[in-house]
Image (cartoon, rainbow, N blue to C red):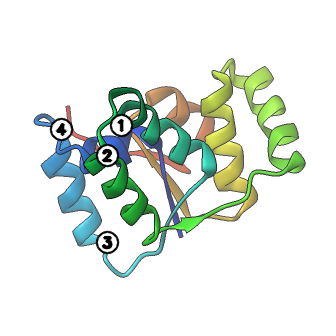
Amino acid sequence: MIYLDSCLVIYAAERDPSYGAQIAAKLIDAEDQVFAVSPLVKMECLVKPLKSGNVLLKKYYDDLFQTLVILDVNEAVFLAAAELRARFSLRTRDALHLACALHHRCHALWTNDRRLEHAGRGFAVPILEK
């Protein structure tokens, strides 16, 4: 199971001109994998369509989330995130993403965030070529 960071889901779903096609290709190449997100990813993805009133984009995200495993974020995840945040000076949301993926024993966390790559020590993989 591979945890997808919010930025990757947003870039792919909204067909970002710089990264959308690249992420779509990586997801297709890994079609035999199970992909997972947390409620935090869902929240971050839904802010834009809710703020702008874009009903079609919100529905697209809702449909997309039905194809992904949604991982719980419980107290243990928050406590692990606190340790990661303290140890690596991560932002709260980044620490939560990493802690959630580790807690649920994902094989990797795909991201575009180099801070997560450092803190994840090989577990968090930046999949985008700059």
Label 3 residue SS: loop
Bin the neighbour count of mark 1 within 10 Å (Cα to Cα): few under 14, some 14-19, many 20 and up. some
Q: Which mark is residue 30?
A: 3
Identity of the residue drawn at 80% across and 47% down: 77
Q: Residue furthest top?
A: 89
Tag 2 secondary structure = helix
Q: Are marks 1 and 2 in contact (CB under 8 Å)?
A: yes
Q: Nearer the viewer, mark 1 or mark 2?
A: 2
Number of other residues with Cα within 10 Å of mark 3, as a class: few under 14, some 14 to 19, many 20 or more: few
Rendering quarter of residue 43 = top right
Determine which residue is flagged by label 4: 16
Rounded to the nearest angstrom, the CA distance separating label 3 from label 2 is 30 Å
The tag earlier along the polypeptide, 4 or 3, is: 4
Q: Which tag, 1 or 2, sits closer to the chain's start?
A: 1
Whether tag 2 and tag 4 are in contact, CB under 8 A, the answer is: no
- The residue that label 2 is drawn on is 55
**Mark positioned earlier in the residue sequence (3 or 1):** 3
> Is 109 above or below relative to 128?
below
Instruction: Name the residue type under label 4.
Output: Asp
Mark 3 residue type: Ala
The answer for how far apart the CA atoms under marks 4 and 3 are is: 20 Å
Looking at the image, tell me whether mark 2 or mark 4 is earlier in sequence order.
Answer: 4
Identity of the residue drawn at 67% across and 33% down? 95
Decide which of 65, 29 is in the foreground and name it.
Answer: 65
